[in-house]
Image: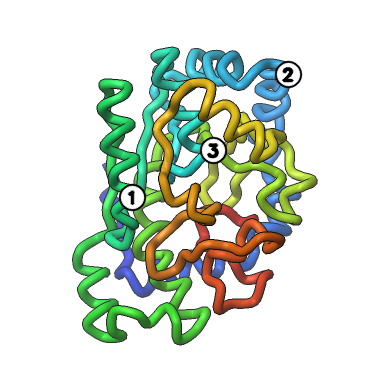
Amino acid sequence: MQAEILLPFTELFEVWQKIEATARPRRLLCGARPKIKMKQIQELIKNKLPEEALALLANEFPERIVFSTSLGYEDQVISHIIFSNQLPIDVFTLDTGRLFNETYSVLNNTLERYKTRIKVLYPQTEAIEKLVSEKGPISFYESLENRKECCFIRKVEPLKRALKGKSIWVTGIRAEQSDNRHDMSNLEWDEANQIIKFHPILNWTLEEVKLYISKHNIPYNSLHDKGFVSIGCAPCTRAIKEGEDFRAGRWWWEQHDKKECGLHSR
């Protein structure tokens, strides 16, 4: 068996940057095999409710379907669907080491409510120690390059570990969240991670999400009641004002078109 080659972390970050730079044009040219598979999956889940589609995919891809939760509104809806229906879908979350206390409370309340487990992935200790030792604890405020490096170490690299060997990645993305998501399909090929992404509540409005949360008494982050719509790491998230864009509270010191952490290309 050929030994797996592990790149130094700095080289791995540089490789990821190159992939990110080319992912969008290449996505349109992704190989025939993923296209054929996606067409078959699209037919399988066509006109199905989120719980029906997830059940079908879990049956079609046993042990190869995962859901990543950030414990926000949308993800709590999907977690409820998975746990309340006992769907065989692995659920994981990324603990960046910079989360709000309220986010940890949601995680704990969710575990208690559904009597289940959520896998928690952490950044590599050596990479975090090197970053903070060399650039300080708030280098992400100093440049876009530094912020992307921090996001890569704390979020992207752990995500890639979680997705390794999987076929379907379930997300809580909604089209309403961003202008460049309005033309998205609920099923898409992720070139950077070589995986099919499924967005079961893509076309839900925020109001529909809130009503579902309330109807089913689902645990949610109390920061949502204080103007926090999109919740990430504490130093990089603020509440938004009435009329502001959904993503205005994330990396607010950056230009609007730069506000992605690398987990999703859009």
Which quadrant holds the N terminus? top left
258 versus 205 height, above or below: below
Depth check: give the residue in front, 57 or 222. 222
Residue 64 is situated, as x and y percent measured from the top left of the image, at 43, 27
Secondary element at tag 3: helix
Depth check: give the residue in front, 169 or 96. 96
Q: CA distance from mark 2 to mark 3?
A: 21 Å
Residue 248 is situated, as x and y percent measured from the top left of the image, at 61, 65
Q: CA distance from mark 3 to mark 1?
A: 16 Å
How many residues crowd mark 1 within 10 Å: few (<14), some (14–19), many (20+)? Answer: few
Name which residue type carries label 3. Glu
Depth check: give the residue in front, 104 or 192. 104
The answer to whether one can see residue 187 in this image is: no
Q: Which residue is mark 1?
A: 102
Secondary element at tag 2: loop
Q: Which residue is mark 3?
A: 74
- Label 3 vs label 1, nearer the camera: 1
- Label 2 vs label 3, nearer the camera: 3
Secondary element at tag 1: helix
Name which residue type carries label 2. Lys
- Residue at 25% x, 69% y is 128
Which quadrant holds the C terminus? bottom right
Residue 92 is situated, as x and y percent measured from the top left of the image, at 36, 38
Name which residue type carries label 1. Glu
Tell me, yes or no, whether the two marked residues, 2 and 3, touch with CB atoms within 8 Å: no
Q: Which residue is mark 2?
A: 46
Q: Is residue 220 left or right of residue 74?
A: left
